[in-house]
Amino acid sequence: MASAPKQQDDTDLRDLSPIKVYQPQRVAVSEYGMASTQHYLATGAAVGILESGGNAIDAAVAAAFALGVCEPAASGLGGQTMMLIHLARSHRTFALDGSSRAPNRTSVQDMSKEQRLRGFQATTVPSTPAVLAYALERFGTIPLGEILRPAIQLAENGYRISELQHKLTVRVRKHLQEGPAGQLFLKDGKKTFKVGERFSQPALAATLKRLGRRRVTDFYHGQIGRLIHEDMTRNEGLITKEDLAQIPWPIERKPVSSKFGDFRIVTFPPPGAGRTLIELLNIISHIPKKYRNVDTPEGALTLAQAIRQANRDRKDRPFDPNSYAQVPQKRMLSTDYARDIARWSMRNIKTGGDTTHLSVMDKFGNVVALTQSIERVYGSCVATPELGFLYNNYMTAFEEKDMKHPYYLRPNAVPWASVAPTIIFKDRKPWMAIGSPGSQRIVSSIAQVFLRLGKQLPFESVDAPRLHCSADGTVSLEASRMRSDIPTTLEKRGFSIDVREPYSFYLGSVQLVMREGNKFVGVADPRRDGEAGGPNK
């Protein structure tokens, strides 16, 4: 039987003033496994499961449900979930493509941009409940009712609002006030909760309890599904009982992979962005080591060019995930193509998207990297009051002009995803699980941390300043934490500079766990509310 997460929230915060909040443990070490998530209470849920004898899949699913409670702006039952799993016993590594689906009544011609961004028409058929239940039933060891217990307790008892959560809620308060979600996520339906105030979710707790009793099919075929259908009908939403009847179970897919020095990078296939990560690392592998130091102007320029090219190629080469395995020439995975791009980058030097992520390793050798989202911050900003969770706004993640595009917005289409949950192997054994939220910044965040690990400690690699380059040549960077000549050099080479604040929310939030000898190490990115933790037995 799984134990509940440690009640850090009650014991550590009961007597604190509203302006003080719990300080997460950013680095952890354990001999018995490790979890790193974007909220310390979700990490506590995972650690409790591991301590009770559960495996990495059990712990990841428990943490994912918990994140939907204590990080509602980023994920929840109304979103979608992608998982990369390594099973030690069978030596099998595979992706669970948990794409949500556009409703049957979808028509891009009948929808404005605002309707796709917010409101009941902005949401696709949620897949998170189906994906987590599928993973647990096939690869876990603990019943769903026990796995849900930590999330239920968090929803009933509440948790303290962090500074980040307060700021994110302020950002969308106006939109929450306009609909029923304001009743759930604003104080008296109007004001944002202050930093340190306790926030509980009784409606969500009731929904989670029902899932535990009636199984996840109730979300699609039972009372929960009926309430979704009725609420969508009242509010002119597109999802109907016919959409929910086709449960969006995940598809097991073969990951994409590549060598980088002594490591093998295994990451998420289409519709995810793993091939972008592979291309980026392949390009960098063909660049002399003296130009790989991202803390120098030359290294920053090299990285910006490589990120830009990888993002351009992904945009120019979309593939239907169901046919990607049959594509004979996978140019973005080609080392020869990467070498040509690297040579061009060197000549240039000489001449002149909210989401959540968690990573888990267990003592048995199983590994999970999981990324889930409701798309933008607070998703569609609407919810069914009786159910307590926000709907996603994945309608913004489709192509709207080119009808031949594999991610064109049509009935039952899947959205284009930027996720790249990744497992890195060393000596044929899982060495690290890593991932990040951040839309288009996911790949660049993961790559920069991985590149730094060769010369820096794990926390230093995650904590270090970051940059990202968009396909149009805009470089976003934590300039105040970098050498002052880095932005100048980038501007001279034709890049536009977008200065971000230190520890920018915009530039991702990497959660990694790794095995070093007989110990596990976990790191949670200080850019958000994450924590790393491992079991004591």
Image (cartoon, rainbow, N blue to C red):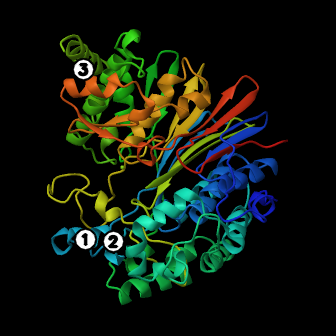
Q: Is residue 125 left or right of residue 146?
A: left
For label 1, the SS is helix
User: Dot 3 corresponds to which residue?
Assistant: 341
Q: Quadrant of residue 517?
A: top right
Q: Which residue is mark 1?
A: 114
Q: Is residue 147 left or right of residue 499?
A: right
Locate residue 138 relative to residue 330 in the image: left or right: right
User: Disc 2 residue type?
Assistant: Arg
Residue at (42% x, 75% y) in the render: 176
Q: Nearer the viewer, residue 386 or 523?
A: 523
Q: Which element is circle 2 on?
A: loop
433, above or below 283, in the image? below
How far apart marks 2 and 1 lie (CA) works out to: 6 Å
Q: In this rendering, is residue 469 above or below 231?
A: above
Please tell me whether mark 3 sits on a helix, a strand or a loop: helix
Q: Is 305 situated above or below 477?
A: above
The residues bearing labels 3 and 1 have C-alpha atoms spaced at a distance of: 39 Å
On residue 118, which mark appears?
A: 2
Is the residue under label 1 in contact with that under label 2 (CB below 8 Å)? yes
The spot of residue 135 in percent (x, y) is: 59, 54
Q: Earlier in the sequence, mark 3 or mark 1?
A: 1
What residue is shown at x 74% (from left), y 64% (from top)? 146
How many C-alpha atoms fall within 10 Å of the one at disc 3: few (<14), some, or many (≥20)? many
Residue sitting at x 33%, y 57%:
415
Residue 322 x, y percent position in the rendering:
33, 48
> Dot 2: few (<14), some (14–19), or many (≥20) neighbours within 10 Å?
many
Instruction: Look at the picture and state if 281 lies above or below 87.
Output: above
Q: Quadrant of residue 333?
A: top left
> Is residue 258 something one can see in this rendering?
yes
Quadrant for residue 195, please give it: bottom right
